Image (cartoon, grey):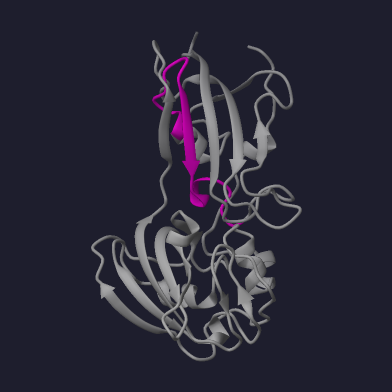
Amino acid sequence: MPSRTLHYSLIPRMISAAVFEPLYRSLPVFLLVLAVGFLSACSSDSNGGGNSGPAVEITDIVEGTGRAVFFGQTLITTFEGRLPDGTVFHSSELNGEDLTFTLGVGQGLRGWDEGLQGMLEGGTRRLVIPPEKGFGDEEFCIADGGCVPPNTVVTYDFTVKEIFDTVKITQTEPGEGRTAEFGDIVFMDFFGFCTSGGPPPFCSEGELFDASNLAGGDFFFTIGGGTVIPGFEQGVLGMQVGSSRSLLIPPNLAYGGSGVRNLIPPWQVIRFEVTLKEIVKPGE
């Protein structure tokens, strides 16, 4: 058996959805949202966390039929944000993609965290957010959107399309022959990328944070051995030799609220491009 190359970023972490990263709780709202690569501020909002202060007004427009949303879950959503005069200043349509974020960990407005918990997958909810839980008392501008004047009440309509807690697998190249099963030793090529990134020193949006060829040597592991993060292991299961997959892994199956120090932010969705080179069955 060849020597194994250790890839620190693939080592499993102990994850608890109840423990939220202190770094993110201590930053102003505009930096929290910037850390997921979605908003960019013209000025900061110094409001703290928690549910104190004026309440968010909540109206369910469409009742969902799926699972209930709670803190620590990663959501795939569409949304529209409006000023009091009805002007749309912020939306997933303007951004050109769905918004994926983890609820209750500071990746969006305080009003989102307060107002979205408890709604059901597939539902649409309207949030009327006071400035204390929105954009605060200074002008705030959105990348690919408009600006919010100081002390403005904003309205958001959110649709929760999905609670993202399983690996999304896309087959990019077919394989042939043996199929990877529990207990197999698999030899892989891989490239790992941050999807949204965070503030320095963390990886930025789309940045490569690890690859099988960076340290030299072969990369291999035993499926079911618990030596790599759960989402990587699950995403490789069932691959054939020579095949390639793209794996989109939610935080609960990656690094959760801990992240990887100075590399991967807490609550980061990550993407791996993987190719299965060889399978060694137990006892061979």
Residue sitting at x 54%, y 67%: 145
Task: State whether residue 175 appears in this view.
Answer: yes
Residue 116 falls within the magenta-colored stretch: no
Residue 252 falls within the magenta-colored stretch: yes
Picture quadrant of residue 126: bottom left
Q: Nearer the viewer, residue 218 or 114?
A: 114
Residue sitting at x 60%, y 65%: 33
In the picture provided, is 186 more to the left or to the right than 58?
right
The image shows residue 48 at horizontal and vertical percentages of 63, 81
In the picture provided, is 227 more to the left or to the right than 57?
right
Q: Nearer the viewer, residue 201 or 147?
A: 147
The image shows residue 18 at horizontal and vertical percentages of 53, 64
Task: State whether residue 73 appears in this view.
Answer: no
Look at the picture and state if 58 lies above or below 166: below
The image shows residue 121 at horizontal and vertical percentages of 31, 62
Q: Which residues are magenta?
A: 235-257
Residue sitting at x 52%, y 83%: 51
Look at the picture and state if 263 lies above or below 41: above
**Quadrant assignment for the N terminus:** top right
Picture quadrant of residue 169: top left
